[in-house]
Amino acid sequence: MKIIATDRNGKLHELEGRDGWSVMEILRDGGLDIAAECGGACACATCHVYINDGWFEKLPKASEAEIDMLDMALAVEPNSRLSCQVICSAETDGIVVTVAPE
Amino acid sequence: MDKIMTETATPIETDVVIIGAGPIGLFAVFELGLLDLKCHLVDILDRPGGQCTELYPEKPIYDIPGLPIVTGQDLTNRLLEQAKPFNPQFHFNEMATKLEKLEDGRWKLSTDQGTQITAHVVVIAAGAGSFQPKRPPVPGIELHENAGDGIGVHYAVRKMETFRGKNILIAGGGDSALDWVINLAPLAKSMTLVHHRDGFRAAAHSVNQMRELEAQGKVKFHVASVKAVHGEPGKLSGVTLAGHDKTEWHHEVDTFLPFFGLTIKLGPIAEFGLNLTENLIAVDTARFESQTPGIFAIGDINTYTGKLKLILSGFHEAALMAQAAFHIARPNEKLRFQYTTSSSNLQKKLGVS
């Protein structure tokens, strides 16, 4: 399962997702510059990404906790998500994301 | 007169100065205390606990040995209790900014608040660095920071009165954003709140108060974000706001207060002359000392082969660091290794016998 990710410099990365892992973990292990300060606890809003190309609508909806925590993210758009809360699965194969500015 | 007094202020003298009052800094106080070494701690936050209390005070931690479940706040409270017999001295709301080696071999640490501490040993337990306000990614925003009382971009409100009569824009949806909308609206010339959605993370009663002020015409609220700032450096005159439908409009302001919480930046530690690799301090695993003798690094800030960024690793590192620190601070004394269960000497220090 693939994750197509654009980093803050506009460089495109094709990463291999892992079933059950969060997109944040895949981005971080793939060497993309993403702070993810709280380590995936939905407590810091520093793993903020935009979900592109129609993928936002296909994902399970964000929890109340994630929507609240997005209030602490910068440059939030309607397709913003916290990547620690987006879980890789067969359904997300090919998902397209862009790391948000910091 | 005041100036002269500041310049001649005597530095505080202690055995060990610890940068960072997170869980590892607090446990270091205990381990150093057992060896009769006194500590001062400097932390940029206003309270102990570091990430544990700033990021996840209510979230349970499950991998602390002997504590099957403990929240970040509870762990901090317990570590404070454990360190209490050794009377650690805290310097909160201060950023460690400068480290100098003195002629007598000791170190002098200075903070952004003018505090100076001399110590035999420096322990850096700074986690991922220092918590600083999140700066919105708006080009040129930094040119309007530190523009003066009440004008330009501020990330905190120190004196409300300085904002009287100003056209104020606040961005954010958390408690700080809403609290300052409510508190500053009565003295502002105009008060505008922008947030990316028509919903708020802030406490419900704050949201209700803001909605009331909005209904009374005392606060304007827009679902929008700041795209650009205008005005000569230090003379903010307005901002460009944009809605989600991409419509943009100009909004005149004197003051812009973004409240998006804190993020971690390495900060001045990068200037301490230590050999950093990817913002981490390389240490040996016998002493957890950096390549500069007398400066130790423990917890998430250090790196070595096999390093795991876990609180429990930091506790181990603190214990070994303390042994090495003792020999530096007390070169003529013999270190007596003792167990807290059997040593009446240690028990006396702990105040339990």
Image (spheres, grey):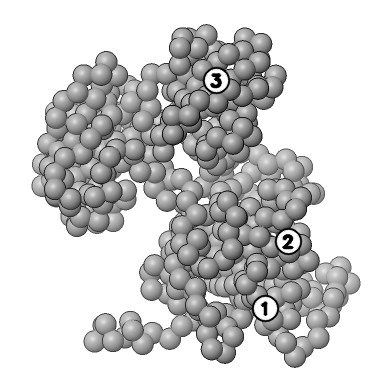
Say which mark, if any, is on residue B37: 1
Crowd tier of the residue under label 1, counting other residues whose Cα lies within 10 Å: few below 14, some 14–19, many 20 or above: many
Looking at the rendered structure, whether the residues under marks 3 and 2 are on a common chain is answered as: no
Three-letter code for the amino acid on which mark 3 is drawn: Ile
Could you tell whether B152 is left or right of B323 in the image? left
Q: Nearer the viewer, mark 2 or mark 1?
A: 2
Mark 2 or mark 1, earlier in chain: 1
Crowd tier of the residue under label 3, counting other residues whose Cα lies within 10 Å: few below 14, some 14–19, many 20 or above: some
Residue contact between numbered discs 2 and 1, judged by CB atoms under 8 Å: no
Say which mark, if any, is on residue B317: 2
User: Which residue is rendered at x = 62% and y = 9% of the image?
Assistant: A91
Residue contact between numbered discs 3 and 2, judged by CB atoms under 8 Å: no
Residue contact between numbered discs 1 and 3, judged by CB atoms under 8 Å: no
Chain letter, disc 1 residue: B
Residue B211 visible to the viewer: no
Looking at the rendered structure, whether the residues under marks 1 and 3 are on a common chain is answered as: no
User: Which residue is rendered at x = 68% and y = 48% of the image?
Assistant: B309
Q: Which residue is mark 3?
A: A4
User: Which residue is rendered at x = 51% and y = 68% of the image?
Assistant: B272
> Quick one: SS at disc 2?
helix
Residue sticking out furthest to the front? A11
Q: Position of residue B198 (x, y in %)?
A: 32, 21
Chain letter, disc 2 residue: B
